[in-house]
Amino acid sequence: MEKKVHEPKLLGLIAGAGDMPKEVIRFANLAGIEIATAALLNMADPGYEHICEKYISVHLGELEKTVAFFQKLGVSEILFAGKVDKTRLFDPTLTLDASSQKLFSALGQRNDDAILGAVARFFGEAGIKVLDSTHLLKMILPERGLMTRVPLNEDVLSDIHFGFRMAKAIGDLDIGQTVVVKNGIVLAVEAIEGTDQAILRGGALCNGGAVVVKVSKPKQDLRFDMPTIGPVTIEHCIRAGIKAIAIEAGSTILLNSGEVLRLAEENGIDIISL
């Protein structure tokens, strides 16, 4: 009797900017899972066609093309990974296909949760389930504790706990996930511009020594916009003269942790997971 050969499981990936999509692909490969990638043009890094056998590039407003790509391959589950530059939504050159136009025109609010929830429903109606973005990355969610070697002083700890409350508050309003604080004062709040620009804005308002706090939203949808830090985050913190970074244990994706900790310690930046 001929032995049946099992095909590897196929998952879809919509790749935005940064290293997170590549981490998804790396961990999928380790698990024997094949990834079909739809990379967002002008956002995703180049080169996905070289690491994914099944690949397409799509514009932000091409929902129909994206769904057709996954349906043709028989993909029934997808992941979102990587940063999506939401300022592109205000770009007059952005072209939306008919489904995207209908989706956006039906939205009462256009905050993150409303937009991403509507996109997930669109895929769901097409028979494609959106999985949690941590589906393959649970092993790189940090545990609670100090991650760098130098103990935090009381002033920094006070700012961290203050910033944690403030970050949770703006997250509850679906504004952002990050605040920059110093001496009990909020210097910057993340909004549509993203974490890196919020860090630079906050750092520019003080003579070094500020604290960055990044948390998940109180009602975080695990399918989208999970708080993430990586080497690029640390590089922006170095430029901004940041003293410490606080993230949320079990709810933050830590990319390339070895490089993150090396850069942080070499530049006197403490990292703690709360």
Image (cartoon, grey):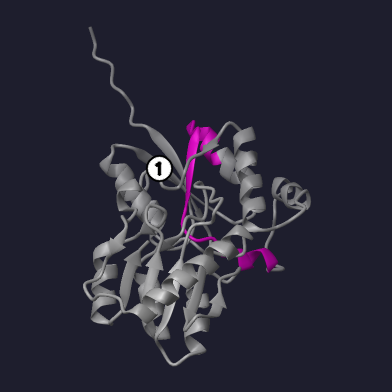
At 63% from the left and 46% from the top, the residue drawn is: 117
> How many neighbours does mark 1 have within 10 angstroms: few (below 14), some (14-19), or many (20 or more)?
few
Disc 1 marks a residue whose amino acid type is: His
Residue closer to the observer: 152 or 126: 152
Judge whether 5 appears above or below 211 on screen.
above
Residue at image mark 1: 135
Residue 102, image x and y in percent?
76, 47
At 49% from the left and 31% from the top, the residue drawn is: 74
Residue 191, image x and y in percent?
60, 69
| Magenta run includes residue 71 | yes
Q: Is residue 6 visible?
A: yes
**Range of the magenta residues?**
69-90
Judge whether 120 appears above or below 168 on screen.
above
At 57% from the left and 72% from the top, the residue drawn is: 193
Quadrant into which the C terminus falls: bottom left
Residue 238, image x and y in percent?
36, 82
- Relative side of 244 to 58, left or right: left
Which image quarter: residue 111? bottom right
| Magenta run includes residue 253 | no
